[in-house]
Amino acid sequence: MSVADAPPAEFFEANRRRVAEAMRPKSLAVVNNNDVFPTNADGSMALHPSADLYYLTGIDQEESIFVFFPDAFEEKNRAILFLRETSELIQTWEGEKLTKAEAERISGVKRVEWLGEFPTIFHALMCEADHVYLNSNDHPRAKIVVETREARFVRDCLERYPLHEYHRLSRILYRLRSVKSEPELALIQKACAITRDGFARVARFVKPGVNELAVEAEFDHEFRSQGGKFAYTPIVATGINACALHYIKNNCECRDGDLLLLDVAAAYGHYNSDLTRTIPVNGGFTKRQRQVYDAVLRVHRACMKELKPGVTAKDWRAFAQQETEKELVDLKLLTTAEVRDQGPDKKALNKYFMHGIGHSIGLDVHDVQIVDAPVSAGWVMTCEPAIYIRDEGFGVRIEDTVLVTEAGGVTLMPDIPIEADAIEELMASRG
Ligand code: GLY
Ligand code: MN
Ligand code: MN
């Protein structure tokens, strides 16, 4: 990683110590990096590194494997990094790869081997281990249509060593990764600061006639020039486009009188932020737009207070739904009877607000989260209520990246305008 303020090796060592404490005696864990995915012909996508590998080692180079055996008989076998060995050919086509010394400096792992050594060393370690922790993607909404590098490794391992006792490393990693430490918070805050600057730039740029693509480009310029990048595919959705939740075409003209929903945020040093603001294209909300905007903002504020340690994702969502229903009645979009009689599938509410109220965020944008675990202090979440009114051709979503504290959610984006007045004021400073 090229980010100058990457966490020191001690951060990754501390993460490994916590994992070791949670593993059974005589346990070995393996974490593989992700594949570089092919496109067409000889094309490939940029590597999206394994968050788990990064969390444990700070290493993001393709094909890397980390083997962790905290109570191995020989000290040299307790943590081993396997790296792709470079060659003249690789250097010519792809550039520099990590040396063993660099990998040791980044990760604090004392033993670094080339990948060619993996089968022999791994077999010897398996002969000594009783338990094996392997990695899997246990995100409930993950759509896995290709077998990942990790999944291929799991399959091979189970086939070759059927008599070991296997466990899911994710049960340990998800719990640990949910609570953010100081170096992680610092990187998330830096991502939020870059996002703030991107938003300020865009708020001064948007006016009737600009294309959504040009808005996206303004964000991109700001993020990249500060060493960041898009945390996720940006949603720049004017008018009714905002009612398509995952609208990413971003190719329409922004029209006078319309609202513009911007779900765009930066990642920095592997850590993510997530922001949505909804702004008036011409710099001023109409009366109706402001009514809806203020309604969503009230739900946002109520949900921030409710985001206290102990609340479960399910209860937090139910609270957000209840608050939104009240606002929908006041906005004359639903009647009290429609809310009362809608049944458990929330059909009436779902016409206007159909997604969750937030998610954990960190190394992944939709970060690890144990579904039934209550929220804890130190988690970083998003809070993102919304009201989408297809019939009126607009949608409003307001989203912040938030730290969970004993007193409730505290925004990590305090200097990104959120009140309608503050947004209008910022936009009024356009040239
Ligand atoms: N930007 C993705 C999300 O809000 O969850
Ligand atoms: Mn989000
Ligand atoms: Mn978002």
Image: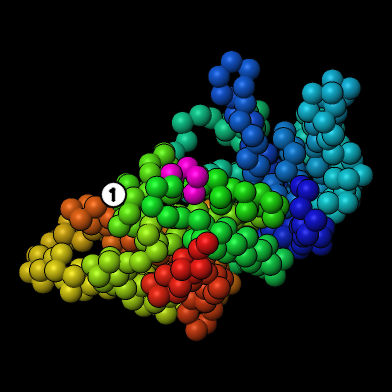
**How is this picture coloured?**
rainbow
**Residue found at the very far front of the displayed protein:** 431
Q: Nearer the viewer, residue 150 or 264?
A: 264
Quick check: 179 left or right of 143? right
Tell me where residue 319 sits by quadrant: bottom left
Check residue 85 for magenta coloring. no
Quick check: 336 left or right of 223? left
Q: Nearer the viewer, residue 129 or 214?
A: 214
Q: x and y percent of residue 322 in the render? A: 25, 71
Residue range in magenta is 211-215
Quick check: 260 left or right of 373? left
Above or below residue 258? Residue 37 is above
Numbered disc 1: secondary structure: helix
Above or below residue 143? Residue 347 is below
Residue to which mark 1 is pinned = 240
Residue at 85 percent across and 45 percent down: it is 103
Magenta span: helix, strand or loop, mainly?
A: helix
User: Mark 1 belongs to which amino acid?
Assistant: Ile
Residue at 83 percent across and 35 percent down: it is 97
Residue at 18 percent across and 74 percent down: it is 330
Tell me where residue 11 sits by quadrant: bottom right
Above or below residue 161? Residue 260 is below
Q: x and y percent of residue 155 in the render? A: 58, 31
For the question of whether residue 176 can be seen, the reply is no
